[in-house]
Image (cartoon, grey):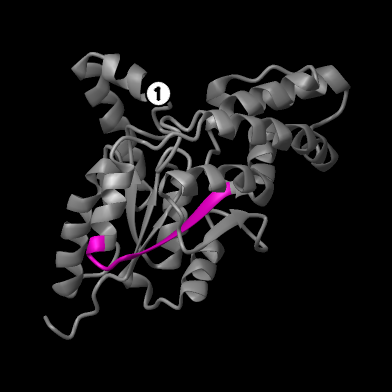
Amino acid sequence: MSDQPALQAVIFDWAGTMVDHGSRAPMGAFVKAFATFGVTITIADARGPMGMAKRDHIRMVGQAPAVAAAWEQKFGRPFGEADIDAIFEVFEPMNIASVRDHADFIPGALETLAQLKARGLRIGSTTGYTRPIMEALMPLAAARGFAPEIVVCAGDLAAGRPSPLMMWHAMAQMGIWPAQTVVKVDDTLPGIGEGVAAGTWTVGVTLSGNMVGLSAEELAALPEAERNALREQASAAMLAAGADIVIDSVADLPGAIEGISAALKAGKRPGHA
């Protein structure tokens, strides 16, 4: 249908989607930050709320039953807002240091960017990282070829993921509407929720991101059956969260964009592809 709008933009997440295969940079920082206060958390504890603003993420980790019990045993009181502030103060510098060591692009990211730009699509981004963390990461990514028009960070607005505010802000700053002409690409459930709430198309990234949490080398070393099982588990969770399409990694995005573009031209809308 010629009167249907065409896709205008893709808004990417960062860690686990475009850079840092497995979204590994924040994990060690969360574990070390809690350990600074004498409380042990696991990588699984740290990964649970990934994609949320980091203060919200710390809150969710601290309120998890096992972590909350360990905190109360250590300090003789429940985990509270002042504790979130204290942990954040040590976490953020740790995460700033770790992103510098995890700034490599996910394989296929730059090739995908070139294809999207060749289609005339504009590129934006949102992230659960704070502005100081992104100030360390953005120059590294820009020097290697990823410099989106806008980077909306956790803490820039009144609420982060899964609220739609960061997405709406990005679209407003880019001057792009309606929402169904935008695609959100993310490797976390809060990031998928962000796109759903904003009314955009959502593409969930399964194997390269937080849902699996492995480096490219670790993922490649897995037996095919194990890799397939991880893909199926991550895909089911993302589809349940509202993703329109799921892909293994950003390298597979051009095909997903083709499908979304065709659905949009046929008059379909996000959630009904």
Q: What residue is drawn where x is 78% and y is 23%?
A: 71
Q: In this view, does 59 lie to the left or right of 71?
A: left
Q: In this view, does 273 lie to the left or right of 249?
A: left
The secondary structure that dominates the magenta segment is: strand
Instruction: Give whichever of 63, 214 is nearer the camera.
Output: 214
Q: Quadrant of the N terminus?
A: bottom left
> Badge 1 is on which residue?
215
Task: Specify the farthest residue to the front.
Answer: 143
Q: How many marks?
A: 1
Q: In the rendering, at what x and y percent does residue 87 appear?
A: 77, 33
Q: What residue is drawn where x is 19% and y is 65%?
A: 261
Asked if residue 147 is positioned above or below residue 9 in the image, the reply reads above
Q: Quadrant of residue 181?
A: bottom left
Residues shaded magenta: 118-128
Q: In the rendering, at what x and y percent does residue 269 appear?
A: 26, 69
Residue 144 shows in this picture: yes
Q: What residue is drawn where x is 47% and y is 64%?
A: 149
Q: What residue is drawn where x is 80% and y is 22%?
A: 37
Task: Specify the farthest residue to the bottom.
Answer: 3
Q: Quadrant of residue 33?
A: top right
Q: Please check the rendered image and state whether residue 262 is part of the magenta-colored stretch, yes or no.
A: no
Q: In the rendering, at what x and y percent does residue 272 appear?
A: 23, 63
Q: Is residue 120 left or right of residue 49?
A: left
Q: In which quarter of the image is the C terminus?
A: bottom left
Helix, strand or loop at label 1? It is loop
Residue 53 shows in this picture: no
Q: Please check the rendered image and state whether residue 122 is part of the magenta-colored stretch, yes or no.
A: yes
For the residue carrying disc 1, how many other residues have a C-alpha within 10 Å: few (<14), some (14-19), or many (20+)?
Answer: some
Amino acid type, mark 1: Ser
Q: In the rendering, at what x and y percent does residue 178 appear?
A: 37, 78
Q: Is residue 86 left or right of residue 264?
A: right
